[in-house]
Image (cartoon, rainbow, N blue to C red):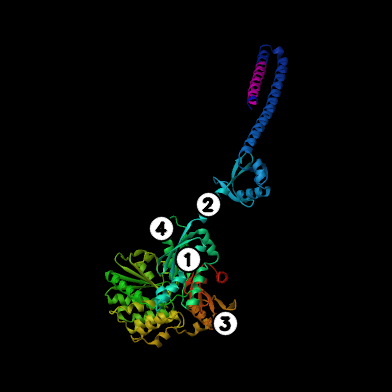
Amino acid sequence: MENLKRKNKIDLKIFSIKIVILSIIIVLAAFISVLKPVTLYIDLVIILITSFISIFICLNEIKNRKYRIYELSKSVDLVLKDSLNLIDIPMVMVTDKEKILWQNKLADHLIPKDLIEDVAFKLEKQSKHTESISVNINVGENEIYSAIGNYIKFSDSECMLISFINKTHEYTLKNILDNTKVAVGLIFIDNYEETFQGLGDLERAEIASKIETELRNFATENKGVISKIDKDRFMIFMEKQYVSQMEENSFEILERVRNITNITKLPITISMGMSYTEETLDDRYKSSSSALDIALGRGGDQVIIKKDKKYEFFGGSNIGLEKTSRVRARTISQALREVMEKAEHIYIMGHKNTDIDCIGSAIGICKLAKCLNKDAKIIVDAKMNTSTKTIIEKIKKQEEYENTFISVSELKKLEVDTSNDFLIVVDTHKKSYLAYPDFLDHFEKVAIIDHHRRGPEFIEDALLSYHEIYASSASELVAEMLMYLDEVALTPTEAECLYAGIVMDTKNFMFKTGVRTFEVAAYLKKFGIDVAEVKQLFQNDFETYIAKVNIVKNAEIIKGKIAISTSEEEYHDMPIIAAQAADELLSISGVIASFVLCKVDDVIMISGRSLGDINVQAILETIGGGGHLTFAGAQIVGVTITEAKEKLLKSIDEYFKNE
């Protein structure tokens, strides 16, 4: 290389001397022709010959220079290629048409040609303006490479240099670290006190031993460690890789514990919350505790895993065991009264599309506030059915309720100072479902009273939370609290509102009705309610009845036991008609679950009902809905009824696949 450079310098000096001599000859010839015109022609001939010689020398020099440049570039290219062959990285040069221009020996040995073309195609799809373009590929069975592309530009074209970096070891270590990450779990025996009530010490110890043995075997089989931290609570630690295996078999430990029921004849189930995505064990413990709370709020008998900000659900076919103890109802009622006494104003808010249960429970809370001489407002959504409007108009006839109800639009116009106020949310626990979601952010003190199965979205940091999914309705929970407050004496109209809420959510005491439901109904009856008047609230006009019949008539039966019907008609009170039609479909022989889809403005609303063998809440939850095992609902925005039905059918198929 050095000899080539030295030779180029000598050749350049000789070329320069030749040009200078020829230039001098041309100048002298021109000067002589001026002094002696006689020699003009001779001088011109000399100038022409000299000029031709100069041009020939220049052209020859250009040719020689191109050859030297070619030789130099060829030498550089050979040196570069030899150097690239020495690098322990497979490298390839390709054109913009995925044509291979060159590859070093390692690439020729390790990377197949068809894989190179495929990688080049994928890299070409990425933006040329990004600093680095790359794609991960599998080479052979166990090798993982990261293909990194860099563009090399020429005067009139460009090519791509692709470097293949072996990432196998890195990915192996990453997978090992990920699989051995410690998962923290909390296990709870559902309704321990209610299940073991009435048993002798020996029987209690024997059954508890069976449960503990099953749990310890479960932990041992999955290379985990389990510790009992209370009579009905365990903590478990295991590696993530074993949690993934349990996810694949849908946590068969749930079924193994349920099998104890066949021996003991007691409804024994467990709930589990687990997490492994947080950075520290403390954060994982807090997340697993939160997941367990959600599992218990959904009726228990299930496992919920917290993954980043999402939850995954396994099991959950239990409807929720009714609690015989009323201690919680009494303590919540006392705590609620104490907070109310310290508040300046009381606001009560339910969910969107305000229904009778929402109004009934709100009126019960409002009655307590008025008995404490507190100003109370019930926030209602503008969208409500005829029955709800009727019951509101009826309660407004009582003078003390004349200015109690306030719409969301009216509330937005007011400048409300809520620094010392108290907000009570009834019949929902989801912020997005509230009649006025943003209003929640104005309060430091919030209470929740709800009976729906708990979902991932939950109003956090509530001062009080009375969330019992065994209850038939929010009205039942509120009425039960009022039973423990001696200062509250309901008027017949107030009692009818609470009773109507229970009637609506139980479908006239047909669904989700327990012993405590009837006891609450008896408590309300003593205030002189007229059952016939309550029944009239649920009567349909002729148009509504015909609409319901048409929906039932258009239903189709899938899987031999599920009825599905759709309606694009825009009837008044369409959500109520759809819900009633779903109830009516359950009266058909062989139908154990039903779904009705209807359109309200730009929203597709789905009402789901079940006799208990199919969990409609689990089906609708996957498409953004929620509710209970036997009745649930969902709202889908931005789709047609046909598209919504396809989503529903897909969710039903997935449900049966998991079952």
On the image, numbered disc 4 is attached to which residue? 282
> How far is mark 4 from mark 1, CA to CA?
23 Å
Residue named by callout 3: 590
Which residue is more in the foreground, 482 or 574? 482
Q: Secondary structure at mark 4?
A: helix
Distance between the Cα atoms at labels 2 and 3? 53 Å
Q: Helix, strand or loop at disc 1?
A: helix
Magenta extent? 4-26
Q: Earlier in the sequence, mark 4 or mark 1?
A: 1
Tell me which numbered mark, 2 or 1, is placed earlier along the sequence. 2
> Taking 510 as reference, is 96 left or right?
right
State the image quarter where residue 28 is shown. top right
Dot label at residue 290: none
Lower position in the chain sequence, tag 4 or tag 3: 4
The circle drawn on residue 216 is 1
Q: Secondary structure at mark 2?
A: helix
Mark nearest the camera among 4 and 1 is 1
Q: Is residue 363 visible?
A: no
Q: Are marks 2 and 1 in contact (CB under 8 Å)?
A: no
Label 2, label 4: how far apart the Cα atoms are: 23 Å
Measured as percent of width and height from the top left, residue 508 is found at 44, 83
Return the residue nearer the eye: 629 or 190.
Answer: 190
Residue flagged by tag 2: what amino acid is it? Lys
Which residue carries the number 2 mark?
174
Count of residue discs: 4
For the C terminus, the quadrant is bottom right
